[in-house]
Image (cartoon, rainbow, N blue to C red):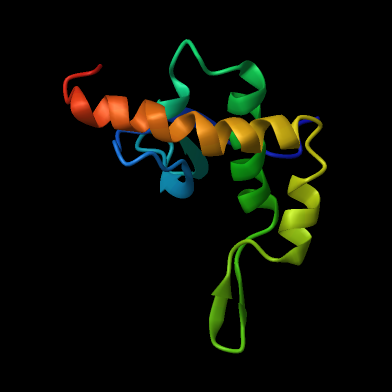
Amino acid sequence: QGELQARITWSNRVGGLSFHSKRTDPLTGEEVNLISISRGYDFENCPLYAVFGVVYHECLHIVIPPVMENGRRIVHGKNFRQRERRYIYYEQWIKWHKEVLPKNIRMMKKKKNFW
């Protein structure tokens, strides 16, 4: 519905992490949200619900930014986790994320010139 604006790209990191960051657009100078998705999701064995799940997760980081509580930075607090579980394919995505993503990342690390 246009409430959230972000650019999405594949991550250059081999470590397997997806992440959200704020960047300055070099042409316009405006600050933009950038979601970088782990290349471990860029495999034929990756179902769309897994890609959508990681995008949903990173979008939640934009909507629910980290907070400081008792000197600690809380990134995945109670509200975040509750909202994350609302994703319709949450259980399937987490299962894939825990079981298949690590295998994909190991394969990437073995073949350094994978892409």
Q: In percent of the image, x 69 and y 57: which residue is there?
A: 64
The answer, for residue 25, to whether it is visible in the render is: yes
**Position of residue 18 in the picture relative to residue 11 (left or right):** right
Q: Residue 10 is drawn in which quadrant?
A: top left
In this rendering, the answer to whether 87 lies above or below 67 is above
The one nearer the camera, 43 or 37, is 43
Picture coordinates of residue 49 (x, y %)? Answer: 67, 23
In this rendering, the answer to whether 88 lies above or below 65 is above
Q: Residue 69 is drawn in which quadrant?
A: bottom right
The one nearer the camera, 70 or 43, is 43
The quadrant of the picture occupied by the N terminus is top right
The one nearer the camera, 7 or 94, is 94
Picture coordinates of residue 73 (x, y %)? Answer: 54, 74
The answer, for residue 5, to whether it is visible in the render is: no
Q: In percent of the image, x 78 and y 37: which residue is there?
A: 87
**Position of residue 40 in the picture relative to residue 72 (left or right):** left
